[in-house]
Amino acid sequence: MQIEIPVKYYGQVSGTHATSIATARATSTGFANNTAHVGQLRITTPVALYGVYRIFLSFDTSILQDALVSQVNLRMQCNTDNSATNFNVQIVEQDWSASDPITNGNRETVYDACLAAASSILWRSTSGISLNTDYDSANLTTSRIAKNGITYFSLRSSRDKAANTPTGLEDIFLTNIRLVVQTTTFMTPQVIFI
């Protein structure tokens, strides 16, 4: 059985700096709810700016409390592709529940942890991406799914992780974000009459 779970929360934390990509990568400067912008950029007009954008997602997976989960994938669409330089969108299995909801006071914690995570799972490359088309990620770790609550992830650019300096636009906007769960059994609640 396949279950699609819509995103509960999505937002971005960004880091910007006029002259230093290292500073933009290491220090957050803002956050925005209901925005799914990932990647990095360098612009020179109207002002010089380096920008780094990481996405934070949560899903209410409590519907799965009695399910035996066999496979989980992240399904998303790109609705704006600014990637003059292509990159891989990496999914970080980051539990940022201690910073939920994200605020100006805790945004740095989630921003830094997203970059620091050593491992990631590929959603897809921006090379050859079609707009408004569903793409599924590689398989996520099934044991991370919080079957009695909320499951958390973050997204980053492979070039952000590798500390590559952008020379132009290398960012995309995502939409229609869902968690696709395959279950081999799905127990239904039983009512016992005495």
Image (cartoon, grey):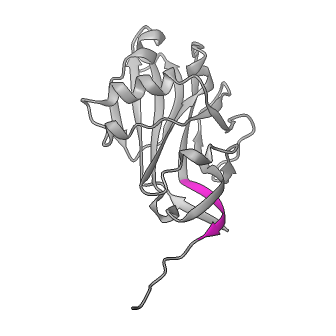
- Residue 72 percent location from the top left of the image: 63, 51
Task: Determine if residue 78 is in view.
Answer: no
Q: Residue shown at 47%/37% (left/top)?
A: 55
Q: Is residue 38 above or below residue 70?
A: above
Looking at the image, the residue that sits furthest to the left is 105
Range covered by the magenta-colored residues = 177-186
What x and y, as percent, mark residue 90?
A: 61, 33
The answer to if 180 sits in the magenta stretch is yes
- Residue at image coords 52%, 34%: 38
Query: What quarter of the picture does the N terminus occupy?
Result: bottom right
Q: Position of residue 128 (x, y in %)?
A: 75, 39
Residue 88 visible somewhere in the drawing: yes
Task: Name which quarter of the figure residue 112 lies in.
Answer: top left
Along the line of sight, which residue is nearer the eye, 45 or 60?
Answer: 60
Figure quadrant of the C terminus:
bottom left
Q: Nearer the viewer, residue 156 or 149?
A: 149
Q: Is residue 106 magenta?
A: no
Indicate the quadrant where residue 101 lies. top left
Query: Does residue 121 appear left or right of residue 53 in this picture?
Result: right
Q: Residue furthest bottom?
A: 194
